[in-house]
Image (cartoon, grey):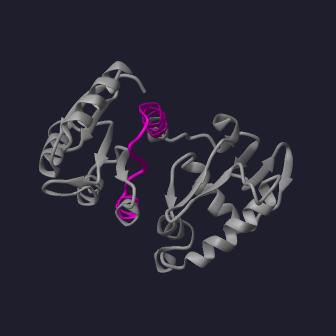
Amino acid sequence: MSGALVLVVDDEPQILRALQTNLRGAGYEVLTAATAQEALSTAAMRPPDAVILDLVLPDGSGVDVCRELRSWSSAPVLVLSVVGDEAEKVAALDAGADDYVQKPFGIDELLARLRALLRRAAPSTEPVLEIGELELDLEKRLVTVGGRRVQLTPNEFDLLRVLAQNEGKLMTHPAILREVWGPAYSTESHYLHVYVSQLRRKLEDDPSRPRYLLTEAGAGYRLVNPVARS
């Protein structure tokens, strides 16, 4: 969404400058902040359409910034994490972040993820979702793959629906469990392993090499369009 207002939060001046230059070159309007407090103040004064947020800030955690933003803003948040930051990354996703890019990152990947987040920020009202050859009729609760009808249990359909409505977005284990089974199941990750395996057997040509339903080790799952990734 060219012209969107993006808030970039990072305490490394060279990263701020590089992101500001590349984002402006891609047609975005850019605000910058180097601390957690500055980020929250800037966002309050000029609510952004999206936020790129470093997890490690001099006066606090990006997780806390994300949690505070989520209390009043629905703008998508893309977090920047470093290798070995798995716990913080997952904590940020659970606090409401929408996706992450690992440092050092390629600017093309970051821009692509930002575009995807902004597209999803305006949810579709269509009762039918199409992702590659996968089609979900939300009203009739019907699923087809390449025109082939797929029989799903109610829980399998609800799991697929949540993933499809967040196409391309990394969904953490607790987030999926809360959406599908409710808050009481947010730590019951064995439910997910069972149902994801069942969905792959029904949807994928080769469940051992999934093209739609991808695992993000230690974090969660994404449902993607395999055509868009090829």
Residue 201: percent from left, percent from top: 79, 62
Quadrant in the picture for the N terminus = top left
**Is 226 above or below relative to 159?**
above
Quadrant in the picture for the C terminus = top right
Count of number-bearing discs:
0
In the displayed structure image, the side of residue 135 where residue 82 appears, left or right: left
Q: Residue at x 74, y 60 (%)?
A: 200
Q: Residue at x 38, y 44 (%)?
A: 76
**Is 131 above or below relative to 70?**
above
Boundaries of the magenta span = 90-117
> Which one is nearer the viewer's eye here, 121 or 222?
222
> Which one is nearer the viewer's eye here, 48 or 22?
22
Residue 43: percent from left, percent from top: 20, 42
Question: Can residue 103 be found in the magenta stretch?
Answer: yes
> Which one is nearer the viewer's eye here, 200 or 5?
200
**Is 49 above or below relative to 142?**
above
**Is 135 above or below relative to 93?**
above
